[in-house]
């Protein structure tokens, strides 16, 4: 298959932008990149997708979400994080979250993500074996971790049950070409020191990601601060910080904390939309980047965002920090694009497979239609993040398999997914009296 007539944003080390170019795909890999005429001459007999002058780039990488929470979208808006969780979300999860819930909600979440150009997401939620089944059927890539708590959840009554489920999940899905298991203790304030250390040991045993919330709110910082140390210092004391750790949010981190994060090579998932909506604060991302800390972008769950839209996340990431620091040069478009692609892949330990368009990498590719009034004229292809919308994503491919073409999903029945979600929403209205 060849994708022709494109402006190719490679997101490689040189940030090469190739105009009037093409990408050749064989099986699940990128096998060639070059001028359209050259590629067409070389692979003229192959199936061709005409990008019509649009942008061809790597699929977007969402480094932190709770995908199935799309079914709680808008359930409890405009509340502080801890009230939102304890009074609404956790009770709803205890009542409604089952394997069937996960299956139905994941189809909705994946439809939304594919239609907005996301090809891989890092998930922390329940019944991740069921989530893996859904993703493998759809053809989408995922890093999946069963959320671990000290208290009972829908899928585990004790921390030990959660750890056993996680290890069984790793053994069953660890060699799948689309699924990458992770260990996912929820946060320092919901997991004991024993659970945190056992989670670390399990991640180290299998050489996989440890995915955890860290220093998201001032309240969390104060809870842990009673012990005389920050969340980062506390995790460091437990030897739970390392290069395989994805620390999500990291809003309330001091300069000393950032020194520790750098020294331990911890990766950060920045979720600005969720942080803004919950009024959690503004993470010191520019300073982290200056320290050469790897930062990817995440949406968080659709119940606190309220979408899984990485286009909105890119746009707001750049603008939030420019405003906050009163400096329009902070986080230029090129850097934000890297955070949403190759640096997101690096956060998850997958930079050798995905995140950039290079020969030998997986063919996780999206095509953006730029022949739209709101994008035209386009002087700098990297700057499209300020004007493009998720609806401008025309085609999505994961591992060479087309999941959406001309805005039509190929592996998901969109109408059925929406109908099922509406039926669940009616149940929720009856339960919560909305």
Image: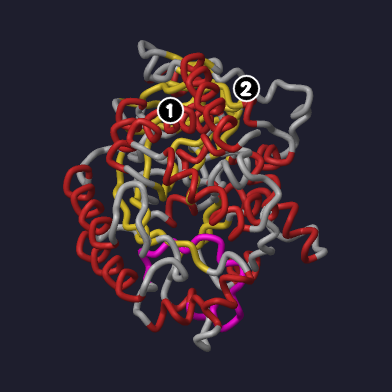
Judged left or right of residue 32, residue 159 is left
Note whether residue 322 is visible: yes
Residue tagged 1: 107
Residue 328 picture location, percent across and down:
80, 58
Which label sits in the foreground, 2 or 1?
Answer: 1
Q: Quadrant of residue 178?
A: top left
Extreme residue in the right direction = 326
Extreme residue in the bottom direction = 228
Extreme residue in the top direction = 45
x 21%, y 59%: residue: 206
Q: Nearer the viewer, residue 178 or 356?
A: 178
Residue 335 picture location, percent across and down:
62, 53
x 27%, y 40%: residue: 129
On residue 179, which mark appears?
none
Residue tagged 2: 53
State yes or no: residue 243 in magenta: yes
What secondary structure is marked by label 2?
loop
Which residues are the magenta region?
Answer: 242-260
């Amino acid at each position: 298959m060849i994708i022709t007539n494109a402006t190719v944003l490679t997101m490689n080390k040189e940030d090469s932008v190739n105009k009037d170019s093409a990408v050749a795909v064989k099986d699940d890999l990128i096998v060639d990149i070059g001028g359209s005429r050259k590629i067409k001459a070389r692979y003229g007999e192959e199936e061709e997708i005409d990008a019509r002058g649009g942008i061809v780039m790597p699929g977007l990488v969402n480094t932190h979400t709770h995908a199935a929470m799309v079914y709680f979208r808008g359930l409890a808006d405009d509340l502080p994080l801890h009230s939102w969780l304890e009074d609404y979300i956790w009770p709803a999860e205890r009542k409604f979250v089952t394997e069937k819930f996960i299956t139905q909600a994941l189809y909705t979440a994946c439809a939304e993500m594919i239609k907005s150009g996301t090809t891989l997401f890092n998930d922390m939620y329940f019944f991740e074996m069921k989530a893996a089944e859904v993703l493998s059927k759809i053809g989408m890539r995922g890093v999946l971790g069963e959320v671990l708590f000290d208290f009972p959840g829908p899928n585990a009554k004790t921390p030990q049950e959660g750890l056993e489920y996680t290890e069984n999940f790793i053994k069953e899905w660890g060699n799948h070409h689309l699924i990458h298991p992770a260990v996912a203790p929820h946060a320092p304030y919901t997991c004991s020191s024993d659970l945190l250390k056992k989670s670390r040991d399990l991640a180290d045993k299998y050489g996989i990601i440890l995915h955890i919330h860290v220093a998201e709110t001032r309240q969390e910082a104060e809870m842990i601060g009673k012990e005389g140390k920050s969340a980062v210092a506390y995790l460091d004391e437990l030897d739970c910080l390392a290069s395989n750790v994805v620390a999500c949010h990291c809003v309330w981190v001091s300069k000393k904390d950032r020194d520790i994060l750098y020294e331990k090579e911890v990766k950060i998932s920045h979720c600005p939309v969720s942080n803004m909506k919950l009024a959690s604060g503004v993470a010191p991302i520019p300073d982290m980047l200056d320290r050469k800390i790897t930062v990817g972008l995440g949406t968080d769950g659709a119940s606190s965002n309220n979408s899984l839209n990485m286009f909105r996340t890119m746009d707001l990431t750049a603008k939030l920090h420019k405003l906050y620091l009163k400096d329009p040069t902070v986080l230029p478009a090129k850097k934000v694009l890297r955070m949403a692609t190759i640096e997101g892949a690096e956060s998850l330990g997958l930079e050798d497979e995905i995140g950039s368009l290079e020969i030998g990498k997986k063919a996780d590719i999206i095509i953006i239609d730029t022949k739209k009034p709101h994008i035209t004229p386009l002087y700098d292809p990297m700057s499209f993040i300020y004007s493009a919308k998720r609806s401008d994503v025309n085609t999505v491919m994961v591992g060479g398999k087309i999941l959406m073409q001309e805005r039509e999903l190929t592996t998901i029945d969109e109408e059925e997914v929406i109908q099922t979600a509406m039926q669940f929403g009616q149940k929720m209205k009856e339960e919560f009296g909305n």
